[in-house]
Amino acid sequence: MEVEQLEIRDYLATCPPLTELSQDCLNEVTMGLEIEYARRDSEVLKIGERNDRVLLIRSGAVEVLLENGQLYGRFSEGDWVGYRSVIRGGPVSMAVKAIEDTLFYSIPAALFLKVVGRFEKVSKYFTDGKPERLRSAIQEIRGSDGFALVAMHVRDLMKLPMLVGRHDSIRQVACQMNEFNAQTAMVTEDDGGLCGIVTDVDFRKRVVAEGRNVDLPVAEIMTPNPLTLAPRDQASEALLLMARRNIRHLPVVENNDVVGVVSATDLLRSQSHNAIYLVGDVFAAKDVGRLAELSLTLPKVLVSLVNQSLPANDIGQTITSIGQAIARRLLVLAEEKFGAPPIPYAFIVAGSMARREQTAHSDQDNGMILSDDYNEAAHGDYFRNVAKYVSDGLNACGYVYCPGNVMATNDEWRQPWSVWHGYFTNWIENPQPKALMYSSIFFDLRCLHGDKSLLKSLQEDVLAKTKVQTLFQAFMAGNALSHKPPLGFFRGFVLDKDNKDEGAEKGMDMKKRGVVPVIDMARLYALAGGIEPINTWERLDAIADAGVLTEGTVNDLRDAFEFISMVRLQHQAKQIEKGQKPNNYVPPEELSALERRHLKDAFEVVSTMQDSMASRYQADRFR
């Protein structure tokens, strides 16, 4: 092989999917290809003609046009054209035109088809569409560790339950649990259906500590109607449910029969992270100093979750459970310090904490909805003190003050229900730029503490309005288009720089250009459809269920969101392991050539969906 051919072979070895070829096959492709040149503005492939080669762009650029003349895409170095017609064995269906002087490596059809037939991954690369490639990539990026929690089901970890009747005495149940060394017992009705759960903690707190008569039925001390799981549920769901609710045991029910019980200990034996125990320690913390100490372990939990190959949604849910536990504990401590609230109120959070999509420490976004019984003279100081205590505590725990002052310490965001109702009505009926900015924050709200009905009644009224206000929908769509995936003119990556870090290198902003476009679209479709969920994945499921978008379209968007989110999370985990502060800027060179291809696929899915959204809501008029 001559020097020039060796250089070509070395280049081919870096181009997906030729990275999957054996050395002998790579040599065969190198020896069998030809070099072609196309001058600028010349036609490379014409619609209707038969194509007998596949072209890899070595330098230059081309554009691909549909039969109606509409632009399909522009491609440059490392991209392939002509393979569709070769695989189909038919005529060219899309024209290819050089828009720069372009050099191709031309692989004869017979040689190309031989390689495709020999290597499955090469075949899938060329035959699968973007959605199929993304789904395969998601499986690869999660790894194949059979011990990862995401790969396990509740049935893999559950133990046989101890069953007792609701009329059995406390003494009888205690003796049974002692005999079998059980920490928990499932309490059943006469027909065998689950009605409660009792644990050794219940005996300490509700029997010994309270001096209760042990001849009373165990139903007196059980936790009634406990949360349950099914055997087929992923073990990660048990982990998240326990972390969110600060519980240690969950019954497993199938066809109304109690078939098992799974404990936090069972889960943690199979995992290295300790999110459940961390949340439990947060709720036991006595002061802000202890909470700040516990919060320091959050980055390590994030790294562990990423390394365990959990889906992005589960990671976000778990990390958020820690942040919200800290906020809730601060609110309890505040009420212990300043006394019980004089009137009902709801402490609300916005943004990623509301959506349960946090990845690490983030800025605060919160507020208070006060009962309309609020009187400034009588109640003002109390709620100001509580808001300041919580906000200062969150800042001490790494959840820094909001740069835009969207916090309950700001009088504007600590208001009675009727004032909040006026805010939302004005934002919906007068969608000006400032209103749209607040819409992107406050249309994702969750009650973290207090009277949930205050927020629920507000959200019900808001959804009734957003569902019919088409002008608001159009403005929201236009606002959503302000964040575009980082794809350039030739489908290369657009790089940004972290303005907060003077020494930072440029990278793809995986937050503003990656996950935010999907979050914005999901929010818009949810508001336009009167759909309640706040979490982006749950919104996408509900959007498909409601028929707002087809299930296939939603699946494609969900897969794109998952892949983009995992690239972002893995980048942050690597930074944390290196002792660096995590950010959202991923340098393309950090990714393999195949990962960059999959990321382009994901960004193109999002970009296509944005175009569809703009057309649906006529958003271009409001950008």
Image: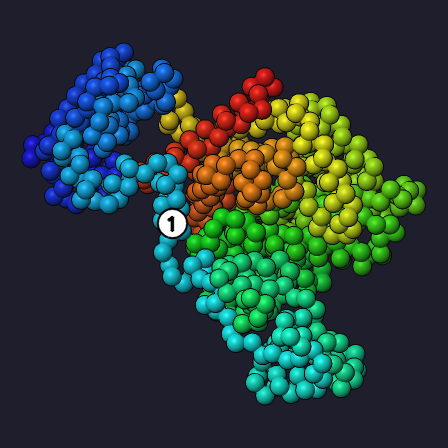
270 or 618, nearer to the observer: 618
Q: Is residue 300 visible?
A: no
Left or right of 142 in this view: 583: right
Whether 577 is drawn above or below 75: the answer is below
Give the farthest residue toward the left.
1
For disc 1, the marked residue is 139
| Figure disc tally | 1
Answer few, some or many: residues within 10 Å of disc 1's Cα (few below 14, many 20 plus, some between 14 and 19).
few
574 or 517, nearer to the observer: 517
Residue 439: image quadrant is top right
> How is the rendered protein coloured?
rainbow
Give the farthest residue toward the front.
191
Left or right of 369 in this view: 137: left
The spot of residue 122 in percent (x, y) is 24, 41
Amino acid residing under circle 1: Gln
What residue do we see at 63% from left, 71% from top?
193
Quarter of the image with the N terminus is: top left
Left or right of 29 in this view: 146: right
Whether 292 is drawn above or below 84: the answer is below
Residue 144: image quadrant is bottom left
The spot of residue 467 in percent (x, y) is 67, 32
What residue do we see at 75% from left, 76% from top?
220
The spot of residue 164 in percent (x, y) is 64, 80
Whether 161 is drawn above or below 567: the answer is below
Whether 52 is drawn above or below 139: the answer is above
141 or 340, nearer to the observer: 141
What residue do we see at 87% from left, 50% from top?
343
Quarter of the image with the C terminus is: top right
The spot of residue 115 in percent (x, y) is 17, 39
What residue do we see at 25% from left, 35% from top?
15
